Image (cartoon, rainbow, N blue to C red):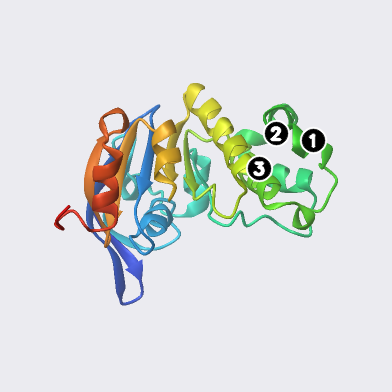
Amino acid sequence: MLETRNLTAGYGAITVLWDLSVTFREGALTTIVGPNGAGKTTLLRALTGLIPHQGEILLSGTPLKGKGLMKTWDLVAEGLVMVPEGRLVFRDMSVEENLCLGAYPTRCRGRLSSNLERMYTLFPRLKERRHQFAGSLSGGEAQMVAMGRGLMAEPRILLIDEPSLGLAPVMVKEVFDIIRRLKAEGTTIVLIEQNTSVALSVADDVHLMRSGKVIFSQAAADVNLDHLHDLYFAREGQAA
């Protein structure tokens, strides 16, 4: 469903991704792990049109350039949606207003009310706080708002960047329970996550990035966690 071919991207004169070719299977949850600076968030920004790139990004087999889909809002309209790292909620707006902003694409507006009720079913805590300013929420609640806002756009492919970052363990469990539910419903998910054990517990496919490249890919069920950590920390060549 989503694929990159020889993708190169970065910021100005600084190249972060180098000839990256990776496929995200339809209906699967693909997790991307790797140390800080590996290029994980840069990959999501390239996929969503937030930064320029060279090489190809294909959606349902068709290059985005060929479809004229180079702007972020065009991609959201096609169902490619990102939940960003750090939540990035609109602090001075209510929880419900934040959620409603996710339904901005024209194809979603007619189902705003029903999708809003679905979010309150998925995240009961948000219904209790729907009139509260988003800036007053806990980190876990703000993460739920960010995820709910993304889901309001009815994504075909959901990109989630570091959902556990800064959260207490009980909130991490709650957030990942929602991710498991979305996966069970058939949503294609690309998950960036530094907690490798939690990431592998929900994943179908695993890619390890380092220095702007994918250096390891495997089905999650076949991954040896110790070996993955050796690769993660670049110690695979060291003596035991």
Q: Position of residue 137 (x, y in %)?
A: 76, 52
Q: At 31% from the left edge and 32% from the top edge, which residue is drawn?
A: 220
Which amino acid type corresponds to the residue marked 3 in the rendered image?
Answer: Met
CA separation in Å, label 3 and label 2: 7 Å
Q: Is residue 168 visible?
A: yes
Q: Is residue 152 left or right of residue 24?
A: right
- Which residue matches tag 2? 123
Judged from this view, the residue extending furthest toward the right is: 131
Residue 127 is tagged as 1
Against 66, residue 213 (above or below) is below
Tell me whether the residue at label 3 lies in contact with that at label 1, contact meaning CB atoms closer than 8 angstroms: no
221 or 235, which lies in front?
Answer: 235
Quadrant of image for the N terminus: top left
Which amino acid type corresponds to the residue marked 2 in the rendered image?
Answer: Phe
- Which residue matches tag 3? 144
Other residues around mark 1 within 10 Å, as few (<14) / some (14–19) / many (≥20)? some
Q: Position of residue 50 (x, y in %)?
A: 45, 59
